[in-house]
């Protein structure tokens, strides 16, 4: 069995955070406590990591408040354990991301979190993860896993997210519900499309209205324009940003939200409460997700075993003023 900081903390009768401070040579620990922790590590045969204290958080869009919120919460949850989260915005799956990861590995990074980065793409370059695996640097995925690697993955349940949105709109009386989805080959987008179609099939609707576009305001606007042309009275957007584009598309056709068309977003950025109209959205459990990511990275850095595979977190529907019964 691998000896981690949990076992050391139990032997020294201190908290895991205190063990982390000793390991990372941080202040705030008395000489007596430090000696007890060092003795416990020696008795248990704990192998002190030679890696640094930096955990890189690779994310594609800091301009999107959802990613900024998650990254900030991860950083805050890592701090008590002597680890420093550093944000690394990079285009997912591209050379820039691979160069980021290689440079981080060269500088002794403690771990890497892929926050909806290349881990969401079917076409991701495996060399990015091979670099980390070869150097035994732990990495974790958020909303997407890693082909050929059993690194932990923590995700929002996209099938449930689609069901929540469809159920809400269906209960309001909508029968022509469209999905403004992300592009094909994006694992999150593909799962939401699958969940959306499944939710409609449960209601005996075979011809699901789905338009694939980019995760941008412009993408949401273009997709919604196409869905309106197909007779949609309600649109489920794959992100809150796309939902803003959906609202713009509705208004440019001389229609109103929600009187003529209802809009549901996805992510749950706090700022969406203050748009006009306040956005009904499927909120990802940002706080629980971020804390679980931090706990997993801390455990891996401390040489502890963690569960393999993907852990799913349940989203929740937040009903505001952008949805209503159809005319």
Image (tube, rainbow, N blue to C red):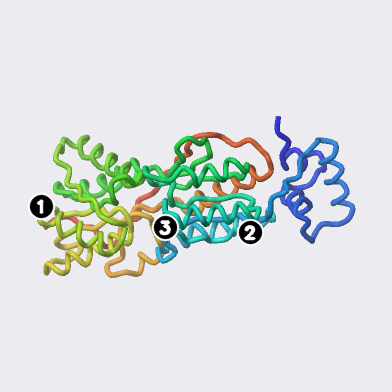
**Quadrant location of the N terminus?**
top right
Q: Position of residue 245 (x, y in %)?
A: 25, 64
Number of numbered discs: 3
Residue picked out by circle 1: 230
Q: Nearer the viewer, mark 2 or mark 3?
A: 3
Is tag 2's residue or tag 1's residue first in the polypeptide sequence? 2
Residue at disc 1, secondary structure: loop
In the foreground, 137 or 312? 137
Q: Nearer the viewer, mark 2 or mark 1?
A: 2
Q: Mark 3 — residue?
A: 91
**Residue drawn at the location 46% of the way across and 58% of the way down:** 96
Residue 319 shows in this picture = no
How busy is the neighbourhood of tag 3: few (under 14 within 10 Å), some, or many (20 plus)?
some
Give the image quarter of residue 158. top left
Residue 113, given in percent of the width and then of the height, sits at 53, 50
Which of marks 3 and 1 precedes in the sequence? 3
Q: Quadrant of the C terminus?
A: bottom left
Q: Regarding mark 2 in the picture, which secondary structure is present there?
A: strand
Residue 299 relative to residue 259: left or right: right
At 54% from the left and 58% from the top, the residue drawn is 73
Q: Which residue is mark 2?
A: 84
């Amino acid at each position: 069995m691998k000896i981690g900081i949990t076992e050391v903390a139990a032997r020294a009768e201190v908290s895991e955070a205190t063990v982390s401070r000793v390991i990372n040579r941080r202040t705030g620990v008395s000489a007596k406590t430090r000696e007890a922790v060092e003795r416990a590590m020696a008795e248990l045969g704990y192998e002190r990591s030679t890696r640094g204290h930096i955990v890189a958080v690779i994310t594609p869009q800091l301009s999107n408040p959802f990613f900024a919120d998650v990254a900030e919460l991860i950083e805050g949850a890592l701090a008590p354990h002597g680890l420093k989260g550093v944000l690394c915005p990079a285009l997912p799956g591209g050379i820039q991301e691979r160069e980021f990861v290689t440079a981080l590995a060269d500088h002794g990074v403690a771990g890497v979190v892929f926050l909806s980065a290349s881990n969401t793409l079917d076409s991701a370059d495996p060399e990015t993860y091979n670099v980390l695996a070869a150097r035994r640097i732990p990495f974790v995925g958020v909303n997407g896993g890693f082909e050929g690697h059993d690194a932990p993955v923590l995700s929002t349940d996209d099938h449930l997210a689609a069901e929540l949105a469809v159920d809400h709109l269906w209960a309001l009386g909508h029968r022509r519900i469209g999905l403004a989805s992300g592009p094909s080959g994006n694992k999150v987008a593909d799962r939401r499309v699958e969940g959306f179609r499944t939710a409609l099939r449960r209601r005996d609707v075979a011809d699901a209205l789905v338009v694939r576009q980019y995760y941008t305001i412009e993408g949401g606007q273009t997709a919604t324009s196409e869905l309106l042309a197909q007779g949609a009275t309600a649109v489920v957007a794959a992100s809150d940003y796309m939902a803003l584009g959906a609202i713009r598309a509705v208004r440019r056709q001389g229609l109103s939200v929600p009187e003529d068309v209802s809009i549901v977003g996805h992510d749950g950025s706090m700022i969406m409460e203050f748009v006009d109209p306040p956005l009904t959205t499927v909120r990802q459990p940002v706080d629980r997700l971020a804390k679980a990511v931090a706990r997993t990275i801390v455990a891996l850095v401390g040489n502890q075993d963690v569960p393999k595979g993907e852990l799913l977190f349940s989203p929740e529907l937040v009903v505001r003023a952008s949805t209503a019964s159809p005319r």
